[in-house]
Image (tube, coloured by chain):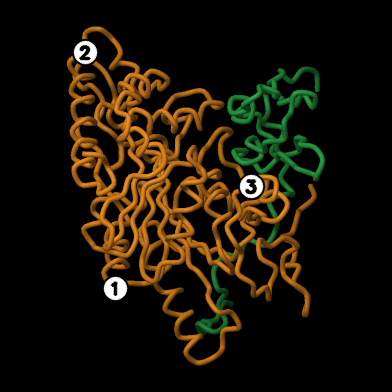
Amino acid sequence: MATLRSWREIPHGGVAFRLSTDVKTGDWRALRPVIDQSKCTKCMICWLFCPDMSIIWDGEKVFVNYDYCKGCGICAHECPVKAITMVPEVGE
Amino acid sequence: MVVKTIPEIPVKKGEPPYKLWMFEPGEKKEFPLVFNLRQLAEQRRPALIPGHRLCAGCAAPIVVKLASFAFRGPTVVVNATGCLEVSTTIYPYTSWAVPWIHNAFENAAATGSGIEAAIKALKKTGRLKYEHVDVVVFAGDGGTYDIGIQALSGMAERGHDVLYILYDNEAYMNTGIQRSGGTPKFAWTTTSPVGSVLPGKGEHKKPIADIMVAHRIPYVATATPAHWMDLIKKVRKGIEVNGPAFIHALSSCNRGWRHEEGISIEILRRAVDTCYFPLWEWTPETGYLLTDRSLVIARNPSLKQPIDKFLEVQGRFRHLLRPENKELLKQLQDYVDAVWEDLLKRASNAPR
């Protein structure tokens, strides 16, 4: 039997409490960006424009976190030295 | 069948509720603006974390990411309903590394106003540890042009210290590409279809930034994520200013604009190059000031490109490039030119 609760007892609204890093959006990908490290000048333009925050700079080189990359190709299009190529995902 | 129960909120006493914050709780220093990208990557975290469910190639997370590099300290983000809200916070997951609130579609600005008033009250009674807590509103064009304009206008009139960032993808993309007040003339949407009767939407885009200029609030600007340095500078100016600020950021939508995913940034660059979306800022003291690429175009008009350059890559304007629709294309070009000439007359740093 439900009883009326005062405004002090009802929840404050929906609280999203888990990090979305649990959701691997990488499986949406049809094209995979591959960075040619010999061409890369580490200008970080790809890191800046990546909508999925999946380009990582570890202090020495730039690499792609394929767990979250959706394969949109913005990095490949914006790369000033064309060091990133979009390769079709094949197999599993 | 295994019934999954909702896990308990992992908050233990004395521990921060989340593992990932843009600003660690209790941090009090003011963050400087960094424009060296490698330093930026090492020193700053964006407000969004990976795993959000926005489409591949969407420019809205880029707007949020770039804006968050301009945050100066603890910031509360308010979201209006829209693509950004529904796909970054699918229950129980959140992609935000900052305190975040969503209330309803129409009242993002009013919610922001309330938070700002609460912060002011807490400060007055000495209950707030921080020197300043900024409030930033992210809203789409539906939540700003059509549904949220009364709340926005009220916020501007009451003078709350809130930065309102509009990411404008020019239709209700979240619900399936319906026309909004921000849709440009002759654009295809599902409620303004192109055929033998209609050539797309029949009305021009509402000049929302000029409406905000008419409120004479301390700071109004337009920006695109393609001109990232300009966007970061403008967001910081909007946050630092004491009073309401408004930034109109164009944001491409590959589903609604019907273009390839990879050219999202290129298309925004073309929007500025064709003067379809001029970059400017306005303050009551200086008036209109052209910035970045638009200032370059004003000084050297030969760099201005015809509107075709912007339209040719988009499927929603495909019908304008047909030979029988030349008249419509000229009409749109004349309108864009008229708006640009008008802006040149008003801008105090444009060459005469």
- Whichever of labels 2 and 1 marks the residue nearer the N terminus, that label is 1
- Whichever of labels 2 and 3 marks the residue nearer the N terminus, that label is 3
Image quadrant in which you'd find residue B18: bottom right
Q: CA distance from mark 2 to mark 3?
A: 45 Å
At mark 2, the secondary structure is: helix
Amino acid identity at mark 1: Arg
In front of the other: B334 or B183: B334
Q: Which residue is mark 3?
A: B36
Amino acid identity at mark 2: Lys
- Residue in the image at 35% along x and 25% along y: B303
Q: Residue A58 in the image: x percent, y percent?
A: 80, 44
Q: Nearer the viewer, mark 3 or mark 1?
A: 3
Q: Residue B148 in the image: x percent, y percent?
A: 32, 57
Q: Which residue is mark 1?
A: B158
Q: Which chain wears green? A: A
Q: Work out which quarter of the rendered image holds the C terminus of chain B and state it.
A: top left
Label 3: few (<14), some or many (≥20) within 10 Å?
few
Q: Is residue B286 left or right of residue A23?
A: left
Image quadrant in which you'd find residue B290: top left
Q: Which chain wears orange? A: B
In front of the other: B109 or B270: B270
Label 1: few (<14), some or many (≥20) within 10 Å?
few
Marking on residue B326: 2
Same chain, labels 2 and 1: yes
Q: CA distance from mark 2 to mark 1?
A: 47 Å
Q: Residue B248 in the image: x percent, y percent?
A: 37, 49
